[in-house]
Image (tube, rainbow, N blue to C red):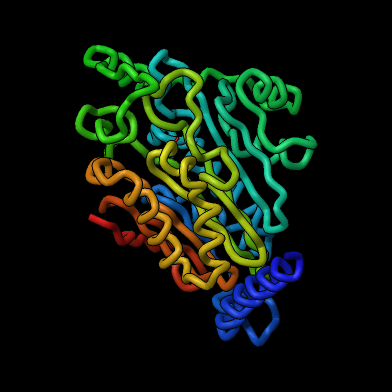
Amino acid sequence: MADRRDFLKASLLGASALALAGKAGADTAGSGKPAGGARVVSTWDFGVAANQAAWAVLARGGHALDAVEAGAMVPEADLKNHSVGRAGYPDRDGHVTLDASIMDADGSCGAVAALEHIAHPIQVARRVMERTPHVLLVGEGALQFALEQGFPREELLTPESEQAWKEWLKTAHYQPSANSEVRDYGKTGLPGGKDNHDTIGMLAIDASGRLAGACTTSGMAWKMRGRVGDSPIIGAGLYVDGEVGAATSTGVGEEVIRNAGSFLVVELMRQGRSPQEACHEAVMRIVKKRPGASKDLQVGFLAMNRYGEVGAFAIQPGFSYAVCDARKQDGLLPAKSVF
Ligand code: ASP
């Protein structure tokens, strides 16, 4: 039995190694550096501006981890962005609660969930990673930690967000229950409909070939108090493995968590899929389990392998991702989709 297990393990390792070795041509003469040099990618059109901040770090030879942190802070600070950071729409009770995660190539990671009153949750996530023995801090405890670390306590609900919330309250018909059917999301305007999502997920490879990723969001607008999506869950909204690649997601976080989405994408790349193929397959897992939901449900994955190759795939059309490298700093590409 042990022999058989060892044999299977050796075969699987061999298959992974072969799959990755097949891509070795993309490497720069075996230097371990990405063939295309440094590159950063991120979700949605606001990723273009975020990428530029990340690129400023990468272009001077900086670390991918510093790049994704700097990049994620751009939409967090943008008062016009109502899905990330300071101006994010609140939950159904009017509280702005933020989720974020950050991960390095060696598996180091940190995250915060349901964090209130702190404008840059990605920075707190990094502190969790670097200054605590833990991975994830939530709610009051996350706030306490952030304040102890010197982050200022701020009112995050902007007048525009408050106005939008009050408008929503007038017509609100979101009565979540344990039995809520996912397929009702889009039709009834429940969170997760194709117009009620956004998150920045950012992946970078630096000039030395180091990968890192970050993900930050205010989660779904008008969510139940205490609801946490995929973004701060390592393996769901973000996953990085320096030997293989990195992935991040956007859309209905519940579906991503149920399928350990970003981990799945990275594992599919480990088995030899291109970033594009891996994102496609991970999306199809969700679609297969939710056939009735797929027309109204959005989930998108974005991935980068350790050679800097990029791919993306979504359930619905409309998911875009921004790419920035030495050749082009403001690229925005539409992701392929199921429908
Ligand atoms: N994935 C995020 C969440 O579920 C939301 C989004 O991407 O729009 O919280």
Indicate which quadrant contains ligand 1.
top left
Q: Quadrant of residue 34?
A: bottom right
Between 283 and 48, the residue placed more toward the observer is: 283
Between 246 and 266, the one lying in front of the other is: 266
Q: Is residue 127 left or right of residue 15?
A: right
- The reply to whether residue 52 is in sight is no
Q: Is residue 292 left or right of residue 320?
A: left
> Which quadrant of the figure contains the C terminus?
bottom left
Quarter of the figure with residue 109: top right
In the displayed image of the protein, which residue is found farthest to the front? 1
x and y percent of residue 143 in the render?
65, 22
Residue 257 coordinates in the image, percent (x, y): 49, 41
Who's the residue at 64% across and 18% down the image?
140
Left or right, residue 7 beside residue 18: right
Q: How many marks overall?
A: 0
Which residue is pictured at 48% across the width and 50% down the height? 261
Residue at (40% x, 61% y) in the render: 281
Q: Position of residue 332 (x, y in %)?
A: 36, 60
Quadrant of the frame with the N terminus? bottom right
- The image shows residue 287, relative to residue 155, as above or below, that is below
37 in relation to 184, above or below: below
Which residue is depicted at the point 21% across and 27% down? 188
Horizontally, residue 32 falls left or right of residue 282, namely right
Does residue 289 appear in the picture of this structure? yes
